């Protein structure tokens, strides 16, 4: 009879020990799978595909305020730099700006002699061949013949008979840069130049899409359904039962 009771106690002790082995101890974390993200800039890997972006220092400057156009150009052949077009009415100016080793570029313009108006800005990259396929025939103030440098043909005029200005010129230049057979890429902006003391008119702005950053998954902590005190007590009871069983059987 005593052997049966001892055997039963031993079996219970072994069951408790097995349960404690299977259940995780309270407070011990189970490591979660790490989630990591690496940006192209951090890893040193850059895309070979041509890319260009630009911003203007103020969307509503006053005549006399300096205006800076800056941005980033990557990929392709940028040995010739980028072309910045600024035009409003019969005024047009095209400037070639060098690109730094890190892809950045910047050009500051003086506005003291410019008439108040809505100005259109195009920033053009020569893409893979390093050649501007669309250019101004005679770059500078009040020069107006836009040409296709591949075909040597006139695309449109900013001045003279049949000329186009402002929004129509912006569309004509976009169409020229998008036509088949040329690989230049571009981005465009606007700014409203106001007279000193005047209230700036409404400005058309483009809002960039927000950048989403991946957040690493939080580690999860698995806890035993039994408190630490109960777990420790069960271990002690199991040990005593096992010792008692060993004594009875010898």
Image (cartoon, grey):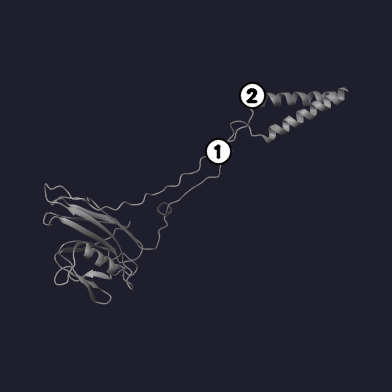
Secondary structure category for the residue under label 2 = helix
Extreme residue toward the right, this view: 1
Viewer-proximal residue among 40 and 185:
185
Q: Residues within 10 Å of mark 2 (few under 14, many from 20)?
A: few
Secondary structure category for the residue under label 1 = loop
Disc number at residue 220? 1
**Image quarter in which the C terminus is found:** top right
Q: Residues within 10 Å of mark 1 (few under 14, many from 20)?
A: few
User: Residue 243 appears at what percent x and percent y?
Assistant: 78, 25
Q: Do the numbered discs 1 and 2 sit on residues whose CB atoms are within 8 Å?
A: no
Q: What's the residue at 41%, 51% (across, down)?
A: 42
Query: So how many labels did they put on this image?
Result: 2
Disc number at residue 107? none
Q: What's the residue at 72%, 31% (across, down)?
A: 17
User: Residue 30 appears at what percent x and percent y?
Assistant: 59, 38
Among numbered discs 1 and 2, the one appearing first in the sequence = 1
User: Residue 231 appears at what percent x and percent y?
Assistant: 66, 27
User: Residue 137 appears at what percent x and percent y?
Assistant: 19, 71
Say if residue 250 shows up in the picture.
Answer: no
Location of mark 2 (residue): 229
Q: CA distance from mark 1 to mark 2?
A: 23 Å
Q: In terms of image quadrants, where is residue 48?
A: bottom left
Q: Is residue 130 left or right of residue 233?
A: left
**Image quarter in which the N terminus is found:** top right
Say if residue 41 shows up in the picture.
Answer: yes
Q: Is residue 36 above or below residue 78?
A: above
Q: In terms of image quadrants, where is residue 45?
A: bottom left
Q: What's the residue at 35%, 68% (across, down)?
A: 128
């Amino acid at each position: 009879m005593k052997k049966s009771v001892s055997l039963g106690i031993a079996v219970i002790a072994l069951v408790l020990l097995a349960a404690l082995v299977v259940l995780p101890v309270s407070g011990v974390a189970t490591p979660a799978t790490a989630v990591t993200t690496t940006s192209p800039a951090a890893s040193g890997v850059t895309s070979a595909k041509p890319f260009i972006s630009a911003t203007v220092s103020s969307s509503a400057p006053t005549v006399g305020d300096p205006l800076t156009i800056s941005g980033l150009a990557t990929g392709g052949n940028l040995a010739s730099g980028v072309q910045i077009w600024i035009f409003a009415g019969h005024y047009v100016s095209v400037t070639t700006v060098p690109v730094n080793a890190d892809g950045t570029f910047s050009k500051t313009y003086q506005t003291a002699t410019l008439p108040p108006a809505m100005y259109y800005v195009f920033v053009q990259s020569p893409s893979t061949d390093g050649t501007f396929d669309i250019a101004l025939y005679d770059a500078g103030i009040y020069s107006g013949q836009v040409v296709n440098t591949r075909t040597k043909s006139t695309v449109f005029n900013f001045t003279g008979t049949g000329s186009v200005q402002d929004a129509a010129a912006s569309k004509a230049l976009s169409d020229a840069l998008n036509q088949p057979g040329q690989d230049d890429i571009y981005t465009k902006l606007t700014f409203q130049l106001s007279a000193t003391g005047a209230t700036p008119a409404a400005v058309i702005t483009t809002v960039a899409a927000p950048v989403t950053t991946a957040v690493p998954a939080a580690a999860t902590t698995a806890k035993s359904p039994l408190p630490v005190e109960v777990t420790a007590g069960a271990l002690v009871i199991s040990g005593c039962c096992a010792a008692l069983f060993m004594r009875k059987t010898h």
